[in-house]
Structures are given as C-alpha cells and as structure tokens.
Amino acid sequence: MTIRTAVLPVAGLGTRFLPVTKSIPKEMLSVVDRPLIQYVVEEAFSAGIEQVVLVSSRSKSVLEDHFDSHVELEMALEAKGKDELLQLVKDLTPPKGRSISAVRQSAPLGLGHAVLCAQAVVGREPFAVLLPDDLIWTDDATPSVLTQMVEQYEKIQASVVAVMEVSPAQTNLYGVIDPSNPDVSKGDSVIKAKGFVEKPSPDIAPSNLAVVGRYILTPEIFPLLANGKKGAGGEIQLTDAISALLEQQSVFGYRFSGTRYDCGDKIGYQKANLALSLQRPDMRSELLPFIKEQLASWS
Ligand code: UTP
C-alpha cells in the first residue's frame, strides 16, 4: 500500500521557545525565509504524499492560513508587476490532487495523543508522521528523508522510524533503538528493532541510534495509542505505542542521509539558520566575512 497521508503534529506549547511562542506558533518561526512548517509540508509533497493533516490547536490557525490563498496580497503583487514574489506566494497553496487539512487536539496531551487525533482522516492505511521542529536538510542530489523512508517502506512493508547516530553521552536526550542485531557499527541503513528505550542514560543505552521526527506507521498503532497509558510527563507517548506495536509486528529503524537540526531548541534553531543561510550563494558572500569578523573578535 502506498503512503498517501502525512500527519504533522503542531499542537504543542513550544515552551522551550518562550516568550516568542506565547503568541506565535513555534512552527511559524522562520529558518532563513520560510517557516518551519513549510519545510515539512514541502518534504511531504516531494515524497508523493497526497493529504497533509495538521494536528492543530485553538491558537494555531495561522498555520493553515500560510497555505491558503491570499487574494488581496496576490492582487497587489500582480498590480506592481512583482511576478517572482507572486509566484512564491501562489506556490504555497497545494497543487492539484494534494490537500492540507487540519484536525484539532483540544489539549496538549502528548505526541501520541496528537497522532491519535488524526485517526479518522488517516483511516486504515499506513501513514507518515513528520515533526516540524526536526528540520532535516538534504542537498540537491539527495532525496528528502521522507522520500528515502517511503522507498524503504515499499520494500519492507512495515513501520519505519528515522534514526541517527548521536554521541554516546547524549543518549539520555532521545528515544533510542534497541537493535535486534547489536552490531550496528557496520552502518546498515535498515535496522530491525527489538525495542525502544526512552532517554536511557549512556551506561544502559542499547545503542547510540536516536529516533528523530520522521515515522512511517501502520494503522495498528491507533488502538495502541487509544489504550496507551500516560507515560513520561503525564503525556501519551508515541514511543510507548511503537514499543507495544513491536509485540505484534516488525518495526525498523532507518539511518537516513541528511543533516538534522533540532529547531525546537534555541541552539539547534540558530544552527539551522546559520547553515541554511550559508547554503545560499547570495547570502554567503556577506555572511562569511561577518562570521569571520565575529570569530576574530571572540578569540
Ligand atoms: P515537543 O515536545 O518537541 O513540542 O513535541 P512542544 O511540546 O511544543 O515543545 P516544548 O518541549 O514545550 O518546547 C514534538 C512535536 O509534537 C507536537 C509539537 O507541536 C511538536 O511538533 N505535539 C506535542 C503536539 O502536537 N501535541 C502535544 O500534545 C505535544
């Protein structure tokens, strides 16, 4: 079965980014000149997704507005002959055959609960989950991470979660895969999971392969989320349901090609802005001398 639907949970409170997130959704923070949400929506469509479902909340309708047409603005740009900007704005609305819709999560009861809120729209099909605060950059020669994962799903027909190597000292910051074959050092990209451990301290971590915000899940995850007990932080955790899914069917980790920036965190967000600005030839020429100047003043 092909992956038609992508669920984008955007109903979190974004407390790590207060005060800006008091009135602006974290997913609208911009990296260079695009809001975080736009990167994941584009990634989803590039992977062949037909319907994107935002799991949103009361204060976040601006996210839907970003992908809706803005007639007044389009007319003004047209009248001024600003064709490039007009195209930029028009390209935000989904192309024919693609859609962006939203369901509500009435209270931030956790990522697992947010995914469960999309069940009626997803139906009984495998689906993707993308977390907008994980920006995963791939160069022009590399397919997007979700494209890579859909390709793997088509081969193995089982749930796939994105994993990346982190330094062993950092395992306590992530959910970590417990691989069936403990020898993950040889760099296989697809890794069969025996379990997942949430934020293990380095001395007991089963691997240093951390789960990041891209998943392809089979619909059997939904009853497990519905029956899910509250886990860490009193929230319904997606990782707990994926661990329960493992008792019924295989789940694989996928070591993707790409660079992940944790844009839910202030440092990761700044790194993303810096790295992606430097990718742009027009910005690089002014930014590089500025960075060198700054470095010199600090040394
Ligand atoms: P995070 O824990 O990173 O996001 O959840 P948060 O809760 O918004 O941020 P902090 O920790 O308070 O700073 C990962 C993703 O899951 C969504 C978030 O919007 C984010 O995209 N999420 C989280 C929900 O949609 N609902 C929830 O109840 C919790």
Image (cartoon, grey):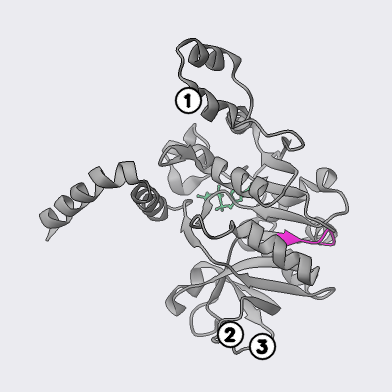
Look at the numbered discs 2 and 3 and tell me whether their residues touch, using CB distance below 8 Å.
yes
Label 2 sits on residue: 184
Nearer to us of marks 2 and 1 is 1
Where disc 2 sits, the SS reads: loop
Q: In which quarter of the image is the N terminus?
A: bottom right
Region rendered in magenta? 216-220
Q: Nearer the viewer, residue 12 or 191?
A: 191
Q: Is residue 75 left or right of residue 288?
A: right
User: Residue 133 location in percent, x, y?
Assistant: 53, 50
Q: Which amino acid does label 3 sit on?
A: Asn
Res. 227 in view: yes
Of pointers 1 and 3, the one earlier in the residue sequence:
1
- Above/below status of 176 relative to 136: below
- Above/below status of 283 relative to 162: above
Residue at position x 67%, y 49% from top?
A: 109
Where disc 3 sits, the SS reads: loop
Label 3 sits on residue: 181
Q: Residue 85 carries which label?
A: 1
How many residues crowd around disc 1 within 10 Å: few (fewer than 14), some, or many (20 or more)?
Answer: few
- Above/below status of 123 relative to 72: below
Q: In which quarter of the image is the C terminus?
A: bottom left
Tell me the chief SS of the magenta region.
loop
Q: In this view, does 249 lie to the left or right of 297?
A: right
